[in-house]
Structure formats: structure tokens, C-alpha cells
Image: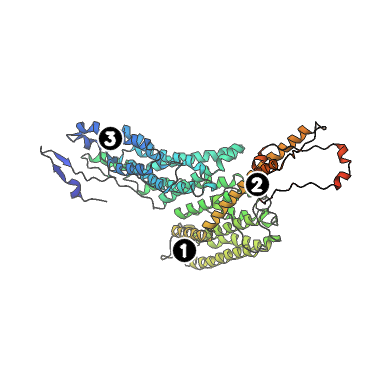
Amino acid sequence: SKKSNKDDSDSDSDDDGNTQTNTHTDENKPIHPRQLQKSPHYNTLHPYMESFFKSTLHLLTETGKEPRLQKFVLSALSKYIPYFSSFPRSSKPLLKACVKLWSAPLDTSQDYQMVRLQAFLRIRQLAITQPFPFIEECLKTTYLSYAQRSKFGTASNVTTVLPTLTFMGNCIVELYTLDYASAYQHAFVYIRQLALHLRTALMKKTPESVSAVYCWQYVHCLKLWVAVLSAAVGGKGSTASVAHDDDDGEENERNDAKLGGGAGKDDEANLLKSLVYPLTEIILGTVRLIPIARYVPLRLHCVRLLQQLAASTESFIPTTNILLGILDMKEIGMKPLRDGGGGKGGKSKKGGGGGGTIRGLRLPLILKLPKEGTLRTMEQLDGVLKEVFVLLNREVDLYRYSPGFPEFSFQIVQRLRKFNKEISNGRWRAYSKGTIELCEKHSTFATQARSTLVDAPKDVRRLEALKPSNMPSMRDRYDATVAKEKRLEAVTQPVVSSSAKNKGKDGKNEAKKKNETTKKRKTESDDEEDDISLDSDEDDKVFEEDDDSDDEVAKKTKSPAKQSKKKRKVAVVNEADLKNVEALKEEDEVQEGIVWSDSE
């Protein structure tokens, strides 16, 4: 909260007549070290403050798995962060400890999420209140921690790691919009690093170089820089205005600019806008690296990133050729496999005309399709084509107010009409017809609206020259469509009840028990085979049964479990006994006095 100049200039006088600054200072307001050194008690309190900061840092590093204690220490430390400007040796260890808590990979509980939030607030507070070079250290350490953590952001960790990565990405976007000048330096270096990885993969095309690009870590880093540039260029980034109460006016102005005071200037924002073009080329190069059907999900990831950049910067970045290129793949027109082809697809007829509901793939959570039966199952085909038409509709909505939209949509309409003739699936043809109608509707509006323009086509500089004043901007329309798609996805996702979860657990337990019993049976049969092999060498020995008394038989029947543990002996019959046919007619003698039960 901001305070008036009167509150900032208030001072209290002690018994000796010395003036002291007001104790109610802003936590996000930097304190110049010279201001502290002017205090008469500075030399006395300096060692105590240093000892306090070191003890607090030691407590943070030694708390271990105590989220409540960590949250309390971090929240209580907020009032003392501005005073770290006089202790530069303690600032970097504190930043390191906060970044470690902020990016901890193990704990994903609700209590620890508050620890992550408090740790980020302290990192942001350090970036604002400490002298200039320190904000660059904050930007560097946070991005490297995010890049290391993004290795584990796969579809298998959708409920644990991916939400944490989303939170960390939003935090980094907040930090990089504090000071655009410093953000440009780091963004340039790290975007260039992504370009070097892509260049190595394009030149060598070895499995190692390709895997460095076609992985979740590379995709998450692309997403992060797209979000940073979108927030900075789109004007939604937060700026921090910093001021000093020092007497040195010129020095304060320089410090204000370094600490983020000039972060809202257009020339500094244009620095980050200049990185939009190289980042777009990197994403397009990633799409063209291996243009095969297996990496269709990765291509769709890149299309979403390009559309996000186009909407935030209000620039023309077409992705139509990428989406229509998926429709030209030979697997789209082939008959889906009836058995699933190694995937999870269901049965279908020729042409993909399957009835009933199809469990769709969650394409935002995968990078590649299975190696066997790629785009040959009904599940994969329906999920990919549905996502293609969703992105095509989003592309049409982005450029609907451009004067060149009729020419832009001509290629889309022509290819989709050809697609309707080649495909017999009613669902896919309905998707295609809806996109065609949307293109024709916006083309009619653009043709009528551009006829009233005074400027010639070469003189039109604005992309949305036909947009009415009461209609939302390109970025607002994009955000609205993305929010609508997320709501639809949340509604269409199947909800697993608690009873179904319990049944699943019971089924797993039963399967484990069955596996254990089969293993025991196999071991018993192996023991029997060993006994048979041992006894087969002794053909003259025959197993003799003890029929001495009924008491002994009763004892044997009372403990069948103990008998099963012992090794069983198998009777070995001589060939002479097998030739005795009369022995087959003899009846077996049954011992009286024994009651058999089902359990026995």
C-alpha cells in the first residue's frame, strides 16, 4: 500500500534529540545502505543484524520436511528483506535457499504449496529491494531451476509435476516483467541457447541431438519464453516503481531505472518485442525437424504457441500450412485398424465411420504417438482431427478482421472441401463443414468492410483494420476462446467415482494374490519334477504306505497344511506292474472313520 509524502517524512525523536526514521516502512521499498549508515546506532546494531540474518538462513536450510515452520519463517522474514541491502554476503545465500524451497521437486502437498508461494514472494522482494546486479541473479537462478525441473513434466505426472511447473512459469513471467532491460539480456541468451540446440539437431540429425529438441524440457522452455514475451509485449506485465529517500537525486534516478523504475517504457518493451521473430523461427524449425505422423502432437503444441504469440503481439504468424499438412498425411485416409494395431483404438468400419463414443486422447499431455499403429486407430484419428479443427477455427477467429482474410481463407476452404470428398466419417465431415461456414461468413464481412476503406492495400499497416470499435481485441478473443475450450475439456473429462477407485484397488490386490498363488504353484510343480527325476533312477524302490493303525491316519488328516509344506514323494511303478491288467479291476480300499470336508 502506498503512503503519502507526509507519512514518509514523519520522524520520531529520542531522548538525546537525535532523529530516527519512521519504523513503518514499505516492505517492497529499497533502503539505501547510506541511509542506514547515517543512523548513530548503526555500528552497534550491525553485528546483531548480521547474526540474526545468518541464524534465520541456517534455520531455513535445516528445517527439512516442516512446511508450517518454513512458511512461518518466510512470511516473518518479509519485514527484514529491505535491510539485506547492507549485507550483500547474506543476500545470495538467502536467494539460493528461497529458490531451493520454491523449486523443491519432492513435496506436492497443499501445505508445501504455501511454502512455494512464500518463497517466491521473498525472491520477488529481493529482486525489487536489492541493488541493480542482484535482479539479474534472481532471473538467472529461477530460470535454471525451472529448466532443470521441467525434465519431469510428462503426462505421467499430470497431477503432481505439471501444476507445479505452471505455477513456476507464472512466477518467472512475473519476475521478467519487473525490469525489461535485464529481462532482455537473459531472454536473448537463453532463446539463443534453444536455437543452438535446434541447429545441432538439424545439421547432425543423430538420435542424441534430436532427443535434445523433441523432449518435454525443450517444449516447456519454449512455452515459458512465449509466455514471457506475450506478457511483456501485450502490456499485461507488472512494473515496479522504486524510489529512494536519499539526498543524492541523480544517483537515485539511476538506481530506480536499474531496480525496475523504468520498466514500463515503450523502448524497453520493444527490446523484448524484437525477440518475437527469432522465437517464432525456432518454433517453426522445431515443427520441420522430423515431419512424420508420430510427432503430430508436438506439431500441435507448436501451433498453439505460435497462435499465442500472434494474439499477444497482434502480428500475422500463419499456421494454416502446418494444420492442413496433417490432413494430407496418408494415414488420415487409410482404413483404421480393427484390432488397435498396438494402440488403444476401438473397432471401426472402412473410412473411419465408427458409431458410438470414442475415448479421446489428451493431446496436450503427449509429445508423440505410439510407434506401432501410428494414426491407425480410431482413438488417435478422432483426437488428432478434432484438435486440428479446433486450432483451425481459432486461426480463423484470430484474423477475421484482417483486410486480406478472404484470400487467406481461400486455401482453407479449398482443402476442406477436398477433405469432405475423401472422408466418409460423418463426425469429421461435420467438423470440416463448420470451419467452411465460419470462413465464408467472415469472408463476406471482410469483403464488405474493406470496400469502405480509404487507404490502399499497401498503405494499411494495422492487422485488424476492419475491427469495429465495440469488438474485443485480438488478444481478448484468444483468451476467451482458450478459456471456453478449457471449460469444455473439464466438462467432457470422465469423473472416476470413489467406488470405482476402490474397485480398481481391489482388482489390483486380487491380481497380486493370483500372481502369488501361481508363483507358489510353479515352485511346487518344480519341486515335484525334481523329486520325479531323483526317484526315476531307482526303479526297484517303491513307495510303501504305512497302514499300521487308524490313529496315525487321523493325525495325518488333522494337519493337512503341515503335510503340504513337506516334499511330496511320488510312487514309481515298475513296467511289470503295468502289464498286470487284473490289478486295474481291483477296488481301492477306503479307510473308515475319516470325515472329509470341503476345506480339506
Expressed as whole percent of the image width and height from the top left, the position of residue 84 reads: 29, 37
Decide: is 451 above or below 224. below
Residue at image position (19%, 35%) is 38
Q: Which sits in the foreground, 100 or 591?
A: 591
Expressed as whole percent of the image width and height from the top left, the position of residue 518 reads: 67, 44
Expressed as whole percent of the image width and height from the top left, the position of residue 91 reads: 33, 35
Label 3: few (<14), some or many (≥20) within 10 Å? few
Q: Which residue is mark 2?
A: 371
Instruction: Give the structural element (helix, strand or loop) at label 2.
Output: loop
For marks 1 and 2 on the same chain, the one whose residue lies earlier in the sequence: 2
* Nearest-to-viewer mark from 2 and 3: 3
Q: Amino acid at mark 3?
A: Phe
For marks 2 and 3 on the same chain, the one whose residue lies earlier in the sequence: 3
Q: Which residue is mark 3?
A: 52
Q: Which residue is mark 1?
A: 466
298 relative to 263 in the view: left or right: right
561 relative to 162 in the view: left or right: right
200 relative to 351 in the view: left or right: left
Q: Amino acid at mark 1?
A: Leu
Q: Amino acid at mark 2?
A: Lys
Instruction: Give the structural element (helix, strand or loop) at label 3.
Output: helix
Residue 312 quadrant: bottom left
Residue 70 quadrant: top left
Q: Which sits in the foreground, 456 or 233?
A: 233
Label 1: few (<14), some or many (≥20) within 10 Å? some
Label 2: few (<14), some or many (≥20) within 10 Å? few
